[in-house]
Image (tube, rainbow, N blue to C red):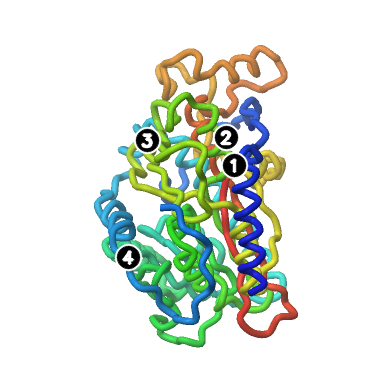
Amino acid sequence: MAEVEESGKLKRKLDEEPDSISIKCLRRDSPVENDDKTANKDGEDQTGDGNALHHETESEEVPKKKAHSEDVAAHYNKLEEVGLEQRSTSRIFYLRNFNNWIKSVLIGEFLDKVRQRKQNITVLDLGCGKGGDLLKWRKGRISKLVCADIAGVSVQQCEQRYQDMRNRGRQNDRFFSAEFITADSTKELLCKKYRDSNMYFDICSCQFVYHYSFETYEQADMMLKNACEQLSPGGYFIGTTPDSYELVKRLEASETNSFGNEIYNVKFQKKGEYPLFGCKYDFHLEGVVDVPEFLVYFPLLEDMAKKYKMKLVYKKTFWEFYEEKVKNMEHKILLQQMKALEKYPADEGSRLVSQIKEDYEHAEMFKKDGKAKLPFGTMSKLEWEATSMYCKQCLKIPEIVIKFLSNMHMFA
């Protein structure tokens, strides 16, 4: 089939040109000025082997392979809910807030695009976790939300958080309806579990999740099917995922089969071999993630999405996205409200998250430049290194397509 042949070409190209996986180094020297007048507390959650390419299957559910999906579910089920006070003491407090700001701006941007043509917006949160984006959907004034995740305990906590939000609201508040589904979206067809099997979505949001599906072609395709097949004409598939180019570049630059720093670590099984599916690596991020993931070769994902009539709108690294969106004053104020950057220099009597001088060399150079108003916002070098591994992407369903439309997500 056409899409399989194209994907096969991508695989051959990758096999023939292993050294072509590279990416320009990201700059980490552009802190943002901070205005204490706008740094208000925000109520949002501060969280958030090799296989040959297979021909598409007509079956709606893929035979279950338990090991990895069960590990993922177990990991996220065991993560404990922590309060804002405990999160504020985390070594990655600003990193998590920064990633959350990225999601907030991304979600808000595409809700605005959809609202230009309709008011009642329906959303699928694919990989909803404990509900870290619920407040974003409320602020976005959507009408209907479907939350799906492989981790049953997380889904229960997500539903409870939703009910708590509704109970705290005013009697006349306009609040979106919601349903909650526990399912492995890489192996199960979600539309069979919806209350209305004919429901269509305007946006599918898949944040920091899609990479778990790249264990096999069948799993990656099922995830795309769930994300895209129930999208309305003109709908969007948005999201974030690790940047495969950056991961491989850092691995090849390492003397071992791993790389990282004090707050994150990535370990591959071997260097020099990167199969299109099943390219597993272990990813550890302090206090948040400690579970195997799979490399996502984005040109292949983009090619696979054509099967669902999807068109790539854009793909940006987190850093590129930040540099573009922070120019907007509304986004800049939100960055400060969400405490997504650390104040530099620190206030008297307070301390920076890192006590290593070298972690703030970039900020000190910016300070000595004399052009910045003090204090300004930044992150430690270790946190910049961790967040620069991600990219964000968006695919759109052409509005002229009547049936079986979809779009997709990624992140850098």
Which numbered dot is residue 65? 4
**Mark 1 secondary-structure assignment:** helix
Tell me whether circle 2 and circle 1 mark residues in contact (CB < 8 Å). yes
User: Residue at coordinates 37% horizontally, 72% vertically from top-left?
Assistant: 180
Mark 3 or mark 1: whose residue is earlier in sequence: 3
- Dots 3, 1 in contact, CB < 8 A: no
User: Mark 1 — residue?
Assistant: 245
Please report contact status of discs 4 and 2: CB closer than 8 Å, yes or no.
Answer: no
Task: Bin the neighbour count of mark 3 within 10 Å (Cα to Cα): few under 14, some 14-19, many 20 and up.
Answer: some
Between 9 and 110, the one lying in front of the other is 9
Going from N to C along the chain, the mark reached first, 4 or 1, is: 4
Left/right placement of residue 168 relative to residue 377 reads left
Residue underneath mark 3: 88
Q: CA distance from mark 4 to mark 1?
A: 28 Å
Q: Is residue 167 above or below residue 368?
A: below
Which residue occupies 61% across, 61% down?
Answer: 8
165, above or below 401, in the image: above
Q: Quadrant of residue 1?
A: bottom right
Q: Relative to 139, does residue 253 appear above or below in the rendering?
A: above
Front: mark 4 or 3? 4
Three-letter residue code for mark 3: Ser
In terms of sequence position, does the residue under pointer 3 or pointer 2 come before the other? 3
* Relative depth, front residue between 88 and 355: 355
Q: Amino acid at mark 2?
A: Lys
Camera-nearest residue between 210 and 127: 210
> What residue does disc 2 label?
249
